[in-house]
Image (spheres, coloured by chain):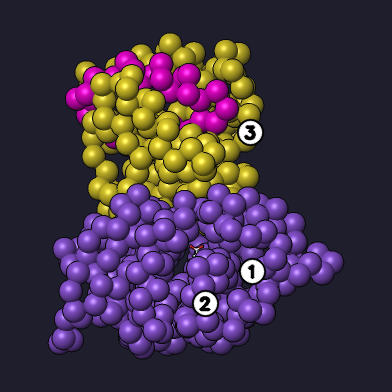
Amino acid sequence: MKYEAVVIGTSAGGLYVLTAILEALPATFPLPIIIVQHRSKDERTLLEEVLSQKCKIHIKQVDEKEIIKGGTVYFAPPDYHLLIEQDRTFSLSCDERVNYSRPSIDVLFETAAYTYKDKLLAIILTGANQDGANGIRTIRKMHGTTIAQDPANALYPAMPKAAIATGCVQNILSLEHIKNFVLGLYTV
Amino acid sequence: MITSAELQELLTSIRNNYGYDFTEYAEASAARRVQHYMRTNRVNSIQELSKSLLTDENAFAQFVLEFTVNVTEMFRDPTFYKSLRENVLKHLATYPVIKIWIAGCSTGEEVYSTAILLKEEGLLDRSVIYATDINQRALQTAKDGIYRMDLMKAYTSNYQKAGGKNSFSDYYTAKYDSAMVDKSLKQNVVFSIHNLAVDSSFNEFQLILCRNVLIYFNQKLQNRVINLFYDSLSPFGFLALGSKESLLFSDKQKEFTDIDKREKIYRKKIKPATKT
Ligand SMILES: C[S@@+](CC[C@H](N)C(=O)[O-])C[C@H]1O[C@@H](n2cnc3c(N)ncnc32)[C@H](O)[C@@H]1O
């Protein structure tokens, strides 16, 4: 298998696009999908509950020190940065906000880049800020694969735009194509 | 990004030189903190960093301050404090003297939040709170009890969500941009340096709070610290962890019962094991 993990970053407008992608995935999808969706800290586990009802693939909020497994969608908890350790476990931090965000997409992407190197697929979706752009740069430096949602049909184009502006995005795709790209990993 | 080997080499030489043991910290965040220090202090390479820290004590003192993450707030996770009030304080009320340890208290917001709860339940006068941290500067701020005035609005809202009984402004005096914590909240608090990675138990407590500290440790160190807490709790004493922390990886997991699963409040089942 070409990839070992998928990381996704999104902010405003994320629920809709995440639903579209995750709904399409079978429960036996082989890779872990690790997601930072900017979210309010009062919401606790609402996002996971909503998506669990719609999706076949297992969806959960990360537990600290949990071992990362395939066939699971992991969400960063509200108000904590999510980091990936070399031994393929998660750790959390309540470090300063990055890009005004906690969890921050950059923090996830950068630590994922150093762990999974060229076996990482990273996707930036709709969002109204610049979080994730630095992370995309690091992922390319470590030879991972990068995708951004086409700003022309993203609900909030700022985030994919900022990622594309780094020159490190290899594929600019519509939501439909992103979905098919991820689904395609199933048969590889 | 520094490699795992470089990080371990640096942390090991720090331990051998200064006795500060960061070698069992979770690596990804430790690496980020080291890089953060390098960036803010304009250190260009790990070699330069290692040389500076091992030869210059002042640089090392500064490193300790910046390596630890001190982010905190008053009534952080209001539902936690609500549960503490409803499920724990009534048990503490049965003790003539209530001893509480707040480990990793950072700049003190958690300490004063707890003191407010105790005060509103009429327990503060017979409580002693031991508040500890490894970060000297954070502890000094905790002792001073002076916080930014512009944060009080958010803290008031947290306090109300936590089931506060009075007006939050009763607990501080506003002075220009600062809010000074009321003296009555400080009376029964003892602040001191304590390093969870190397120091041992120093008393027996009915309640230990250690929130958002274990997330920075690897499993082995987490386990050591949980054992330290176990040995420091009186029979049926309470342990409260951060909302994303748990006893999952501890060999003492079975020695505790859940008081509030969601808020991570546990109670020790039996008498302290005799130390070996
Ligand atoms: C993120 S703060 C948590 C503050 C507070 N407990 C809360 O939950 O808001 C973590 C604190 O743990 C302290 N800490 C880190 N390593 C420690 C150690 N080995 N022993 C004691 N305290 C430590 C840091 O200095 C910092 O103040």
Magenta residues span A8-35
In the image, taking residue B223 as reference, residue B146 lies left or right, namely: right
Locate residue B3, reporting x and y percent.
39, 60
Secondary structure at badge 2 equals helix
Residue drawn at (33%, 84%), measured in percent from left and top? B204
Q: Chain of mark 3?
A: A
The CA span between labels 3 and 2 is 46 Å
How dense is the environment of label 3, judged by Cα within 10 Å: few (below 14), some, or many (20 and up)? many
Placement of A132 over or under B94, stated as above or below: above
* Labels 1 and 3 in the same subunit: no
Q: Is residue A186 visible?
A: no
Q: Are marks 2 and 1 in contact (CB under 8 Å)?
A: no
Q: Find disc 2 in the rendering and name its residue.
A: B124
How dense is the environment of label 1, judged by Cα within 10 Å: few (below 14), some, or many (20 and up)? few
Q: Find disc 3 in the rendering and name its residue.
A: A129
Dot 2 amino acid type: Leu
Q: Find disc 1 in the rendering and name its residue.
A: B41
Q: Chain of mark 2?
A: B
When asked about the image quadrant of residue B214, the answer is bottom left
Q: Is residue B217 visible?
A: yes
